């Protein structure tokens, strides 16, 4: 797989155009950028990794669990990666803060995990981000990001009854005397698309062209601007005439026209006009085809004013969104055009119903998978079954199509509505609509720039195979200690390892297979050295920035009242506004925590919270909890509830149940963010606690959340963060962040960010079979040698159900299936 991808990293076609000349004085409409191609020059010769997550559904209620499957791919053929074994997945709130971070082990590029949507989450749009450390070399634009609503979240209506209209000349420019295409996007009240028809007029009231806007709000028309004339469009919509001016055409510039509808090739036409003074000498230009940050085609030559046509074979370009860029010799952008390169790499899926579809009985299905050539193939799939009637926002969100996610939506910041429609069987007629989408999307991710390092030391990151613990040992003279013995202990896991520091005082423990938040004791000693101070290298995660502002329409795009009705006699011609986008604004309202009373079972119906700062003055944590938690006793290492029949309570540390007798060994009060009492069977299911019928559901949970887990820790286990100027392996000095004890010493306790617990799916019916959520989720189904796999589940009630199947085979072919049926 690696050799196959290495062969397809880049194709530079050194085709020299016999183009007459262009000058550098003319600056077309696209802003000037420099394309350094530095990613290819700097990074190791390894395929680029990408991450995609598949979810059990697209929106969630409060109290649900987000189940997901992670897929790490490498190279253009998006085969599962054998480079990185560690996947980071983060749940981010509306304020761009990480609520929870999971570190997952990926085998053959595949992993799975979950995020509980806790009852104290406010209804809002949350974001899930995923990446490998190797992807940090390319910057956050290459990370997986998906915005998902928790609870019923109504999209804000920013139009207030207004109409939005944007115009997009192909390539970005209009040039006098050169025929080109202009795409239109019409947004009706409520931010919805609208079908309409329209006409293009010139300043002499002549009809130049007519056009149709489809139901998706997109349309296009051809135009050849004439010098000295201006142009405007009139759209008939619901008995009103809407109008808007076209951008003024230039006397000199470039038009980049691309036809992606041919079977085996893409036709690119470069045309334009030069200033008269520059025509004799010509102008050096370069045509580049880029995708996902890489360059796949490059040719250069001299343009003198004559149009040039180029046929580029489709098979030398990767599937998905391709950006064609026309540049000057200095790297200034002259014209840009995005197209979609559609290839035949979709798996063929068929789902057969093997029996009766009745509730509370096993429903059986057989999945059969064939590769694009129609041959049976071994594949890996995730399957979810959802009772559609009970999923919020069902009409607002489409079903998941892995091919669309990998090749289309991943290339843009904003939401693309129903992207799967372009890739279903028989979607050939939608290719023109897909091309219009390419013309009207200004939010393409992959900028013309080099490597965007996000690590603080600005060094290249290698694929991460396992978790490590690194650090530094220094003496009383603040100099590195060579040959010191460093030992690490995890008492709860029965883990112990030793190593020696190198000549620079560094130590490193590889392949640490430990759960998240494992309490490690690290010690250092060397014969003849009285004092050793332990420094542990702090894990470095990329910053969380707000997504680029693209999910809403700015005021400048909406047509003002005086723009809604115009005639050719109107002299006022407003300038074309530039379309911009902003994130949807969701109003967050704090959830009030009720005071514990008899009516709310002393705070257990709505989780009662004790802040960590209120536990600091009581010495041991067990003493503080006994005093501050209402109606809770601590006796002989066990917490009890004062409620009849005094059941023992469970203690969960972050997301893992621990032995209450050792609570003071695990934790210090200074490390605690908060402590909550949780009641309910769903919490026991969430944290993997067996149900005890004798406890009568009174064996509540004491949930202890550390500052590090909550993301509010400035130090770990009373540690302080220091920045040291140290030498790397090549002897170069650089700054790096370490944790060390508040007081110098040869021992320190450290909370290790290990692997997240892999939970097993259990359907959560909230005690009511008629309010089922996701009823079946299996992220790891392999087909057999006949390309088949069995799927069985029990629908809890009558209603409409949706089965979503998404997967990938060994060759990187992708497949998705959306199957709906009714249970009687």
Image (cartoon, rainbow, N blue to C red):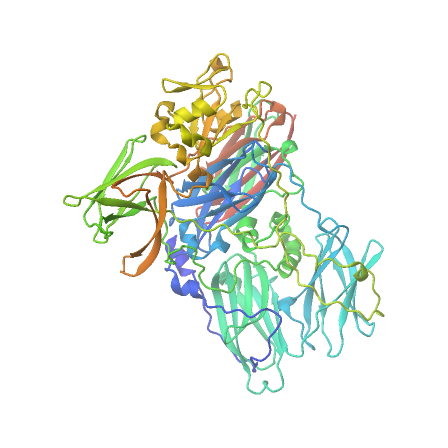
- Quadrant of residue 766 in the image? top right
Give 603 or 162, whichever is nearer the viewer: 603
Give 256 or 702, whichever is nearer the viewer: 702
- Taking the spot 46% from the left edge, 73% from the top edge, the residue there is 14
Looking at the picture, how far across and down is residue 700, in whole percent? 49, 21
Numbered label tally: 0
Asked if residue 714 is positioned above or below residue 706 in the image, the reply reads below
On-image quarter of the C terminus = top right
Give 317 or 233, whichever is nearer the viewer: 233
In-image side of 502 versus 389 (left or right): left
Looking at the picture, how far across and down is residue 284, in whole percent? 52, 79
Looking at the picture, how far across and down is residue 771, in whole percent? 62, 27
Asked if residue 666 is positioned above or below residue 808 in the image, the reply reads above
In-image side of 440 versus 2 (left or right): right
- Taking the spot 48% from the left edge, 60% from the top edge, the residue there is 293
Q: Residue furthest front?
A: 617
Q: Is residue 56 visible?
A: yes
- Taking the spot 52% from the left edge, 38% from the top edge, the residue there is 368
Looking at the picture, how far across and down is residue 451, in whole percent? 44, 61
Q: Is residue 370 visible?
A: no
Give 585 or 805, whichever is nearer the viewer: 585
């Amino acid at each position: 797989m690696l050799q196959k991808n290495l062969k397809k990293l880049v194709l530079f076609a050194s085709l020299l155009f016999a183009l007459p000349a262009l000058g550098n004085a003319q600056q077309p409409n696209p802003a000037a950028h420099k394309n350094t191609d530095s990613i290819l020059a700097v990074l190791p010769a390894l395929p680029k990794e990408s991450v995609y997550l598949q979810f059990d559904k697209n929106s969630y209620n409060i109290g649900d669990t987000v189940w997901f499957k992670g897929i790490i791919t490498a190279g253009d053929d998006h085969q599962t990666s054998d480079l990185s074994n560690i996947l980071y997945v983060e749940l981010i709130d509306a304020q761009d803060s990480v609520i929870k971070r999971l570190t997952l082990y990926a085998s053959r590029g595949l992993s799975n995990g979950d995020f509980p949507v806790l009852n104290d989450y406010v209804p809002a749009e949350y974001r899930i981000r995923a990446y490998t450390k190797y992807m940090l070399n390319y910057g956050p634009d290459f990370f997986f990001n998906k915005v998902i609503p928790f609870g019923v979240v109504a999209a804000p209506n920013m139009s207030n009854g207004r109409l939005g209209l944007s115009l997009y000349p192909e390539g970005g420019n209009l040039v006098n005397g050169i025929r080109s295409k202009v795409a239109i996007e019409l947004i009706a009240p409520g931010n919805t698309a609208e079908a309409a028809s329209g006409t293009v007029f010139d300043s002499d009231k002549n009809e130049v062209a007519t056009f149709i806007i489809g139901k998706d709000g997109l349309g296009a028309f051809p135009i050849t601007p004439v010098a000295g004339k201006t142009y405007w469009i009139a759209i008939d919509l619901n008995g009103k005439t809407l109008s808007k001016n076209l951008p003024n055409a230039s006397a000199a510039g470039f038009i980049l026209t691309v036809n992606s509808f041919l079977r085996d090739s893409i036709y690119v036409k470069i045309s334009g006009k030069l200033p008269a003074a520059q025509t004799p000498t010509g102008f050096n230009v370069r045509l580049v085809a880029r995708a996902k940050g890489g360059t796949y085609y490059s040719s250069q030559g001299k343009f003198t004013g004559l149009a040039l046509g180029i046929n580029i074979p489709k098979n030398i370009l990767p599937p998905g969104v391709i950006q064609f860029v026309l540049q000057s010799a200095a790297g200034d952008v002259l014209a840009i055009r995005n197209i979609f390169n559609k290839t035949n790499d979709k798996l063929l899926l068929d789902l057969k119903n093997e029996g009766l579809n009745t509730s509370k009985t096993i429903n059986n299905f057989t999945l059969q998978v064939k590769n694009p050539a129609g041959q049976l193939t071994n594949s890996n799939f995730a399957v979810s079954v959802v009772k559609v009637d009970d999923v919020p926002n069902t009409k607002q969100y489409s079903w998941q199509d892995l091919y669309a996610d990998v090749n289309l939506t991943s290339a843009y910041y904003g939401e693309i509505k129903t992207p799967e429609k372009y890739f279903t069987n028989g979607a050939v007629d939608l290719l023109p609509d897909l091309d219009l989408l390419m013309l009207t999307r200004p939010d393409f991710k992959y900028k013309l720039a080099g490597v965007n390092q996000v690590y603080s030391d600005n060094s290249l990151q290698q694929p991460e195979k396992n978790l490590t613990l690194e650090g530094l040992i220094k003496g009383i003279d603040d100099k590195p200690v060579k040959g010191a013995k460093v030992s690490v202990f995890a008492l709860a896991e029965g883990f112990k390892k030793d190593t020696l520091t190198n000549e620079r005082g560094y130590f490193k423990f590889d392949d640490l297979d430990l759960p998240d938040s494992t309490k490690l004791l690290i010690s250092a000693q060397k014969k003849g050295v009285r004092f050793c101070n332990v420094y542990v290298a702090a894990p470095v995660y990329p910053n969380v920035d707000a997504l680029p502002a693209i999910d809403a329409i700015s005021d400048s795009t909406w047509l003002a009242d005086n723009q809604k009705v115009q005639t050719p006699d109107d002299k006022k011609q407003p300038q074309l506004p530039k379309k911009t986008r902003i994130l949807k604004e969701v109003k967050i309202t704090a959830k009030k925590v009720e005071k514990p009373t008899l009516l709310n079972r002393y705070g257990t119906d709505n989780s009662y919270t004790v802040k960590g700062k209120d536990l600091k003055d009581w010495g041991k944590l067990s003493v503080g909890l006994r005093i501050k938690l209402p109606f809770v006793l601590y006796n002989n290492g066990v917490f009890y509830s004062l409620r009849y029949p005094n059941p023992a309570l469970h203690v969960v540390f972050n997301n893992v149940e621990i032995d209450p007798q050792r609570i003071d060994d695990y934790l210090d009060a200074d490390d605690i963010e908060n402590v909550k009492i949780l009641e309910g069977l769903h919490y026991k299911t969430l944290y993997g606690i067996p149900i005890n019928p004798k406890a009568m559901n009174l064996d509540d949970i004491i949930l202890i959340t550390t500052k590090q887990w909550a993301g509010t820790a400035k130090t770990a286990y009373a540690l302080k963060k220091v920045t040291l100027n140290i030498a790397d392996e090549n002897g170069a000095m650089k700054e790096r962040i370490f944790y060390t004890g508040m007081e110098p010493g040869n021992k320190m306790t450290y909370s290790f960010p290990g692997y997240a617990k892999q939970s097993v799916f259990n359907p959560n019916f909230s005690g009511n079979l008629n309010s089922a959520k996701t009823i079946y989720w299996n992220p790891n189904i392999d087909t057999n040698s006949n390309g088949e796999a069995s799927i069985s589940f029990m629908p809890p009630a009558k209603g409409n159900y949706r089965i979503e199947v998404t997967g990938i085979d060994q060759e990187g072919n992708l497949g998705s299936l959306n199957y709906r049926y009714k249970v009687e």
